[in-house]
Amino acid sequence: MKGWINLHRDITNHWIWHNPRHFRWWVLLLLMAQWEPRKVIFGKTMVQLQRGQICTSIRFLARQMDACSHTTITFLNSLEEAEMIRRISNSQMTIITITNYDKYQLNETNKKNRKERKVKQEMQQIREDNKKEIKNNSSTIFTRDENQFIIEIESSADFFESVAENLDCDIIQVRELFSEFVSEIKLIGKSHSDIVDFKKHFLNWSRKRTQNEENNKQHHNGTIENDKYAARKGNRIIAKKSKEYGESF
C-alpha cells in the first residue's frame, strides 16, 4: 500500500478518536479507499470504483482489522449511522463509500489540478460544439479535416498577411475573399488532400478573382474614354452641345 492520506485536526474532536481501536480501523478504511477512479477485479468480477470507494468482503476486512466478522459488521453499522460511510453488499462483495472523502482528502494542489482539468474539458467541449455548428451550417457536408482547415486558417494572421502582400491588397480584402472562397467550395463540394492544398487553391483562386476584377475595371474605364472621344467627334447621339462636336452647330 503506497501513498499517503490527509488527516484533519478535527478528528480529535470526533467520537472515533477516543477509541484507539475504532480510530485505527477508520484510518485503515481511509488507506484502503481508491484515490482515483479505477477498475479492480474482485474474485471473477470487474468492478468500477470511484474516488473514496473500497471493494472488499467482510471476511477480508475482519482479517485486516484483526477482529471477528460480527465486530466488523457492528463497526460498519456505527459508521453508517454516523453517515461516515455508505455500504452496498451482496453475497460476493461489499462496496464501501467514504461519504466526505473529497472534503478531507483534496489538498490545494489536487483542487488546482481538478479545476484545471475541468477548464480543459470545458474548452474541449466548446471546440467540439463549434465544429458541430460549422458542419450543421454548411450547405454541403464537409469532412472534419476540411472544417479544421478553415478554423486553422481563419486564426492565422500570418497567412492573411502573406496573401495580402502577394496580391498587393489589404488584409480585410483578403479575409473577404476567403469568406467567398469557403462559400464557393462548400457549394460545389470541393475537398482538399491537406491544408497546404487548401491554401494553394485559395491563393490561385484569389489571384484569378483579383485579376478578373482588374480587367473588368480597365475595360470599364476604356469604354468611358471611348464614349467621351466619340461624343467629342459627334459620332454618338449623347453629344448635346456644340463644344462636344468638332465644329459648331
Image (spheres, rainbow, N blue to C red):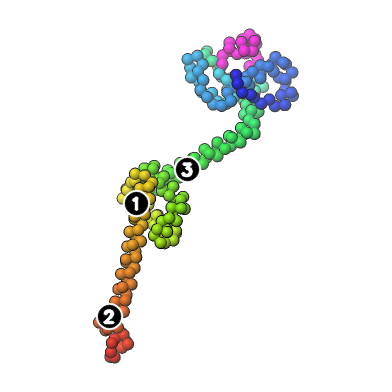
Observer able to see residue 97: no
| Amino acid type at mark 3 | Arg
Region rendered in magenta: 56-76
Whichever of labels 1 and 2 marks the residue nearer the N terminus, that label is 1
Q: What residue is disc 1 on?
A: 201
Which residue corresponds to the image point at 52% horizontal and 24% vertical from the top-left?
38
Say which quarter of the image contains residue 141: top left
Q: Are marks 1 and 3 in contact (CB under 8 Å)?
A: no
Whole-percent x, y for residue 17 in the image: 72, 20
Question: What number is the disc on residue 230?
Answer: 2
Question: What number is the disc on residue 127?
Answer: 3
Whole-percent x, y for residue 151 in the image: 43, 47
Question: What number is the disc on residue 180?
Answer: none
Say which quarter of the image contains residue 59: top right
| Amino acid type at mark 2 | Ala
Q: Residues within 10 Å of mark 3 (few under 14, many from 20)?
A: few
Which residue occupies the extreme top position in the image? 68
